[in-house]
Image (spheres, rainbow, N blue to C red):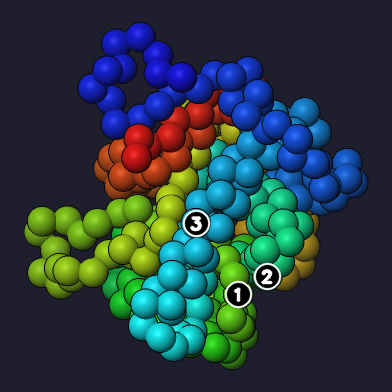
């Protein structure tokens, strides 16, 4: 329901309790072990959260997707021929460490269990970052994740091929372990029913001072977009906590780009994470990411416990 004083808001507001009631009889098709495998390193995702937040969400998404499929059928009837069905594309945006990757994986897993769209692919925009060698040439290694660090033309071309009904469309693959694009490695997307595109930059538009302004945005290819939101202080805390956990896990791998941080003390790791956050991630969040929130169709607002506490849906 709308909250007080939201008469002129473009969104409908729901508390978690109100939202949970909209699940109706949608069955929970994920086991506890599956949910544990899907959640991120520092995410606190319970079966209750999946049931109260993500089941109603995927029920709504299924209704949207079914309507889109029906529209395609109606169009074919009007044209008198069978045209190639194109995938329904969902964009998921939000800050580093806010939990959007877990959100994307949970939505993918739940949607893939619905009978009318079993093939759901997930693509992250990390694969469209420029390789480190290019970022170094451009002096952008300290701005990795900023809009200018992505090969946006390549990403738009990828999405255009998907939306034109192309088969075996390839996306480059990024490794967080080596902190770079993997050469000659691709994710093949072959005629899916749904594609989820997850990344911090997916709702961004070119800046007014960008000499290479394009009339086509990444979000132009989305049928629906979701923004995962939280207070900046909470995101910062989650980022530092995740960095410390990585120090004890992934950073210990000899192949890790960040192996030099594995032997830091907890205090040293927290100080370093805080410095990286302040110089890079906070600025990116404030300047490039958070300003796009009101371009989203659905906003999931998290509380300090990493749990979704409010849902906003754009009015139709």
The answer to which of 16 and 284 lies nearer the viewer is: 16
CB contact under 8 Å: marks 2 and 3: no
Query: Foreground mark, 2 or 3?
Result: 3
Residue 47, picture quadrant: top right
What crowding class fits label 1: few (fewer than 14 Cα within 10 Å), some (14-19), or many (20 or more)?
A: many
CB contact under 8 Å: marks 2 and 1: yes
The image shows residue 188 at horizontal and vertical percentages of 61, 83
The residue identified by callout 1 is: 192
Q: Is residue 42 visible?
A: no
Say the numbered circle drawn on residue 67: 3
Dot placed on the residue nearer the N-terminal end, 2 or 1:
2
The image shows residue 280 at horizontal and vertical percentages of 39, 46
Dot placed on the residue nearer the N-terminal end, 2 or 3:
3
The residue identified by callout 2 is: 119
The secondary element bearing badge 2 is classed as: loop
Dot placed on the residue nearer the N-terminal end, 1 or 3:
3
The image shows residue 282 at horizontal and vertical percentages of 39, 38
The answer to which of 132 and 228 lies nearer the viewer is: 228
């Amino acid at each position: 329901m709308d909250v007080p004083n939201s008469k002129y808001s473009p969104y409908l507001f729901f508390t978690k309790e109100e939202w949970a009631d909209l699940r109706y009889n949608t069955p929970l098709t994920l086991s506890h072990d599956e949910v544990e495998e899907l959640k991120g390193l520092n995410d606190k995702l319970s079966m209750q959260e999946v049931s109260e937040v993500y089941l109603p969400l995927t029920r709504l998404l299924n209704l949207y997707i079914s309507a889109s499929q029906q529209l395609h059928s109606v169009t074919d009837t009007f044209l008198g021929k069978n045209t190639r069905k194109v995938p329904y594309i969902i964009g998921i945006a939000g800050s580093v460490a806010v939990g959007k990757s877990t959100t994307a994986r949970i939505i993918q897993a739940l949607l893939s269990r619905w009978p009318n769209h079993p093939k759901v692919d997930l693509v992250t925009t990390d694969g469209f970052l420029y390789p480190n060698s290019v970022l170094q040439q451009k002096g952008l290694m300290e701005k990795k994740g900023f809009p200018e660090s992505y090969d946006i033309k390549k990403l738009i071309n990828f999405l255009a091929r998907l939306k034109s009904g192309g088969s075996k469309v390839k996306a480059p693959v990024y490794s967080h372990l080596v902190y770079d694009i993997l050469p000659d490695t691709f994710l093949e997307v072959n005629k899916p029913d749904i594609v989820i595109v997850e990344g911090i930059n997916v709702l961004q538009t070119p800046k007014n001072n960008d000499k290479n302004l394009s009339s086509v945005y990444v979000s132009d290819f989305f049928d629906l977009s979701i923004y995962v939101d939280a207070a900046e202080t909470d995101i910062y805390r989650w980022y530092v906590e995740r960095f410390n956990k990585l120090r004890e896990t992934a950073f210990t791998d000899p192949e890790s780009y960040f192996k030099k941080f594995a032997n830091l003390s907890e205090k040293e790791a927290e100080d370093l994470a805080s410095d990286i956050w302040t110089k890079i991630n906070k600025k990116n969040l404030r300047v490039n990411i958070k300003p796009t929130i009101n371009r989203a169709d659905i906003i999931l607002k998290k509380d300090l416990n990493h749990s979704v506490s409010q849902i906003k849906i754009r009015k139709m």
